[in-house]
Image (cartoon, coloured by chain):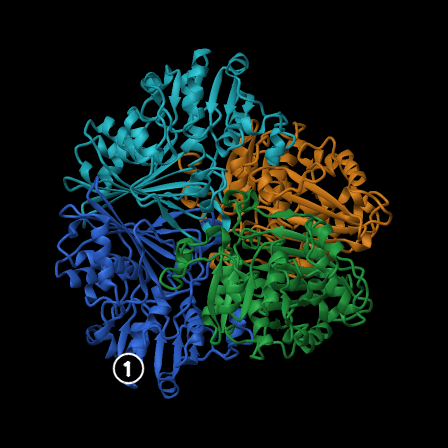
Chain colours: A blue, B cyan, C green, D orange
Amino acid sequence: MKAAIIGGTGYGAIELVRLIEKHPYIEVGTIVSNSQAGTNFSTVYPHLSGIKEIPLESFDAKGLSENNEIVFLATPSGVSSKLVPELLETGIKCIDLSGDFRLRSKNDYETWYKKTPADEQYLQHAVYGLSEIYPEKIKTAQLIANPGCYPTAATLGLLPILKTSLADSKTIIIDAKSGVSGAGRGLSLTSHYAEINENIRAYKLGAHQHIPEIEQTLSDESKTPITVTFTTHLVPMTRGIMCTTYVNLKESSSTEEVHELYEEFYKNKPFVRVRPIGSTPSTKEVAGTNYCDIGLHVDQRTRRLTIVSVIDNLVKGASGQAIQNLNMMNGWDERTGLYDIPMYP
Amino acid sequence: MKAAIIGGTGYGAIELVRLIEKHPYIEVGTIVSNSQAGTNFSTVYPHLSGIKEIPLESFDAKGLSENNEIVFLATPSGVSSKLVPELLETGIKCIDLSGDFRLRSKNDYETWYKKTPADEQYLQHAVYGLSEIYPEKIKTAQLIANPGCYPTAATLGLLPILKTSLADSKTIIIDAKSGVSGAGRGLSLTSHYAEINENIRAYKLGAHQHIPEIEQTLSDESKTPITVTFTTHLVPMTRGIMCTTYVNLKESSSTEEVHELYEEFYKNKPFVRVRPIGSTPSTKEVAGTNYCDIGLHVDQRTRRLTIVSVIDNLVKGASGQAIQNLNMMNGWDERTGLYDIPMYP
Amino acid sequence: MKAAIIGGTGYGAIELVRLIEKHPYIEVGTIVSNSQAGTNFSTVYPHLSGIKEIPLESFDAKGLSENNEIVFLATPSGVSSKLVPELLETGIKCIDLSGDFRLRSKNDYETWYKKTPADEQYLQHAVYGLSEIYPEKIKTAQLIANPGCYPTAATLGLLPILKTSLADSKTIIIDAKSGVSGAGRGLSLTSHYAEINENIRAYKLGAHQHIPEIEQTLSDESKTPITVTFTTHLVPMTRGIMCTTYVNLKESSSTEEVHELYEEFYKNKPFVRVRPIGSTPSTKEVAGTNYCDIGLHVDQRTRRLTIVSVIDNLVKGASGQAIQNLNMMNGWDERTGLYDIPMYP
Amino acid sequence: MKAAIIGGTGYGAIELVRLIEKHPYIEVGTIVSNSQAGTNFSTVYPHLSGIKEIPLESFDAKGLSENNEIVFLATPSGVSSKLVPELLETGIKCIDLSGDFRLRSKNDYETWYKKTPADEQYLQHAVYGLSEIYPEKIKTAQLIANPGCYPTAATLGLLPILKTSLADSKTIIIDAKSGVSGAGRGLSLTSHYAEINENIRAYKLGAHQHIPEIEQTLSDESKTPITVTFTTHLVPMTRGIMCTTYVNLKESSSTEEVHELYEEFYKNKPFVRVRPIGSTPSTKEVAGTNYCDIGLHVDQRTRRLTIVSVIDNLVKGASGQAIQNLNMMNGWDERTGLYDIPMYP
């Protein structure tokens, strides 16, 4: 099966290329980059020298769909919403890594993204691709809205406790830390080496566009409207996201009880590793892989649960989860092509 | 005035040496390191070549007090409690950078430090040296318990709101991030380069020894027993601490109101910079200096205040605050020797 | 086929585990760590949770050889020389990642390693496993002395020009830069985060134990005794080695001519990528993979060739080359299990 | 005395501000930034909040010279050459941190900088401000061409041996490594965090514009035309330059002899620290200061001298040396305002 990648010069795209190369059933068919069409891919990314010596192409929906069976859109927000309708019309399936089809509410999109939302019909059509939570819908989807990096780590960490009566859903605070690759390859002062090295920076307080995405999933799954406090920090590293999440417990509980509940929740989910009690995951421990590792601690003094969830933002937080979704759409084992051991150290 | 430094091979000590060198009224008299007595200081720390060519000495309370007028103890917890009594008896004043004299309760010390506490009389005698909050007591102190790095950033960030009726003191969550130098120069796997580079790690969940220190100050100042959730993270950088602190507001308020309240609280405190609304401090913006910068954001959706406070853990979090306290003890301007502009980038 | 790994708690060993997991024909049989025998491997390395849940074992030559068909020794220098004889006697093949069997001269080993050398018979018996250069000997080897990280990058960069009459072999200078993982997981001040972060350090000037190894290969292949200047630097990164190598040309030449010569030399070597003229490789462009990338520049002004060769020190510089050698020993395609695309960024 | 700074939003400028703040005899009068005129300086650089609350101004030669007694130009190459003539005409002295007045040959400037050179009369007029080497000329200069960062480290490392008959001046190879701040605050992919973190990169092989600057000084001082091989590398750190320099010795010598020669050469130069034999400097050991530290090693096997010289590229490599030159121009102790101890760790 051949896959097309749109947005070929960004980090999402090269991570897709890296992962597809390991996959037994798919290969890269076309890589689209309007800005650099005609250039050899390995000129833009010399680490691909001798491996992917193919030219970047211009966007052409019809051509794409003739040569490929799936399209990954690794485009910025505001771009996918324009390309997807044309692609879907050709009958090809789409997995969109941007935020354009994640929020069902056009209002929310406008408020948080400050851009024109996608058409209503496509928003209703899109399946939110949080693989562990929506496997049935993903199987039959034509259009996957692949989850954001922060929302993946945050919701996988929160859902098991939220779906019990233990959690006080009004008290959720998510303190998130991310490596800099999450901001992409576009130049900006906040990704400038000398500004971010040996530094930690909080940004977009109360204004990050992933807030409504997190709230939508938590509200859907808990069947209550949920509002969260969510703070993002830029950490001097390339890859990795950690969410340290706090939630009050309505009744006294123990780390053991909560831990058991999480193990049960994720028992058949190969990419979520609930860590043994006393073991707290660090981001490097999932580097390069599709794992989401979760550590748990109930503080008896404050009756508060602390959840530490980590992912590689470019894998489980983007391209890896996209492959996992593709596997599920095709009835393959969801681990296909994703068996890697984290690169440590 | 001459100053002695005990614990001469640690990061606290060399930061003291760096700061004392800029100070117009003090100079380094004696540097004590029992483990390396006899060695030249610049052999241990070649960056001092040609600047501080003096031999490290063994501990000798009497000798120290004859040659110096102040002693800084930059020793590990459990050591200061043994040396201070002997030093105080000679009549010399002590500023202790360890945790040994910070907690008034011997029980708390035993519970959290898992070591033998100092004698009751010294614990009662010690003045907690949070410079901005206890200036009067510091002026006349014989023994200063210099605050911990995390507690300095956390309490300076929280006290202005806590001292109003706005804050719901049951909802305090402090999510703290630190550079690796805070762990000192002692070898350990958690300070091993390949383990911490390109990684973020949460540690000591619910068990960090700075918890009771933070709670003691917050409880004292708010006149209510306060329990906090406090989580510490190791970030791949050498210096810097950021506390992202969350507290619910009992009534509706705005960033503007809270900001004004903070500006008022710290109006005569030269080392606390309350940032303009919309500006969130990053750790590099205080690097090498005694500043504590504070950013504020009230989220109307959740009626929660987010406070971002940053310090250089080795300066305001240790040696710089020790100098600031010394200045106050001597009736000098508290800024003496501490006027530096942050080293940016 | 099952493989045993000795030295199971070091970085060489976990990188072997990561690579073996991708390999279609081998799997990990036994992991030996005398210091932590009985401990679960995933307790030492939590990134292996749920993936390699096997206990570490004590060394037992007989047991090992019954359960495995190959042994990788990822042990420190001075240890392999003691274990290998016993292992070879059982008939099992050994690939030693340490320096114990690389130097044919016992004198050289004593001079540079300051330890007792291995027995003469084993030194003569060992095949130096520089895969691209000694494929025939490797195929039939019982004992492979897997090359050092620096020597791999240095000799692969130098050999093509050295084997012509162009190079003035008296003028070789190798300026090498390495990430910190090369020093292993053992604690030391030079791997202490706060000492190496935001720092570059030259070390062991004229005294690095890889000097005689490099000289041995260069002398063998050029059939002249060669002495080199070789300087090592520690760079604040985890993985990666770059050798910037300088050699005078006896006659005028051009980058084009030299480039052609290198392309010819490595034309059937899938893991050596001679970069197009004008493209200089960086270490991240081979991260996590077995590639050695080479960039070339002839400076007409000085008639000097500059060679930039990069590898991932833990892959092509250690465990990856070990797998490549195993592939060759078994008649498999040398790329088996090693097809990865570099992890970029 | 008041000083004007042109190019106010770059790293050179903020380092000048930091250093001037410590200086007893000068203060910042005017900060010029045409691109951001009118903006408050602390809005561009929040680390200056409450310290330098002054607006950035447009360039106005006449106004500048009325309010200030010295001008520092921290402008890009190609800009200073246009502003300096106008400034000198007002009678004010200029210290130019760019490359515009360093090369006496207009041809060389055009060849290496690929820009229009400054007018001949100004090139002849300018004094090359390598403080340790040209103190007499600096004292009476109207226009200082402040040396480049790499040339400062390289020439201070080489001159003592070059001025003897020992060095074979045809064999000089300078392998230079720099932190990323040297590339300034302008956005570019080579300063993009995710591209340079966990990476080392060689760049501009044989083409760096500092080559003719180094050769000019070495040729002047040795009274022979000298051609060097000079390679630059970008290292994942913010500050610091290390030059590892190789030169063949014409006769047999020892580290001791060479070391004595260097100590003699720099005996009255407070900012050059020749390290004891066996001690090799690292960049962090001079961080934030005006020191140039030099380590030496003679390899008997190859009769080659290795010189390791390190500086902070923003201090001795730019703004610090500019202040040192200003001190000398005014007859002040050259250390005035520059006494700092390196910030370690």
Asked whether, in this view, residue C305 is left or right of residue D200, the answer is: right
From the top left corner, tell me how far across and down residue D66 is, in percent.
55, 35
**Residue drawn at point x = 46 percent, y = 67 percent:** C29
Inspect this view and state whether residue D200 appears.
yes
* Chain on which label 1 sits: A
> Callout 1: helix, strand or loop?
helix
Q: Residues within 10 Å of mark 1 (few under 14, many from 20)?
A: some
Identify the image quadrant of residue D89.
top right
From the top left corner, tell me how far across and down residue B81 is, in percent.
40, 23
**Residue drawn at point x = 77 percent, y = 62 percent:** C301
Q: Nearer the viewer, residue C162 or C277?
A: C162
Q: Nearer the viewer, residue B315 or A293?
A: A293
Inspect this view and state whether residue B335 appears.
no
From the top left corner, tell me how far across and down residue D328 is, in percent.
67, 32
Q: Nearer the viewer, residue A92 or C167?
A: C167
Identify the image quadrant of residue D91.
top right
Q: How many numbered dots are placed on residues in this image?
A: 1
Asked whether, in this view, residue A285 is left or right of residue D210, the answer is: left
Q: Residue furthest bottom?
A: A66
**Badge 1 amino acid:** Leu
Residue A106, compared with residue D284, is above or below; it is below
Residue B340, compared with residue B234, is above or below; it is above
From the top left corner, tell me how far across and down residue A128 is, in percent.
24, 70
Residue position for label 1: A88
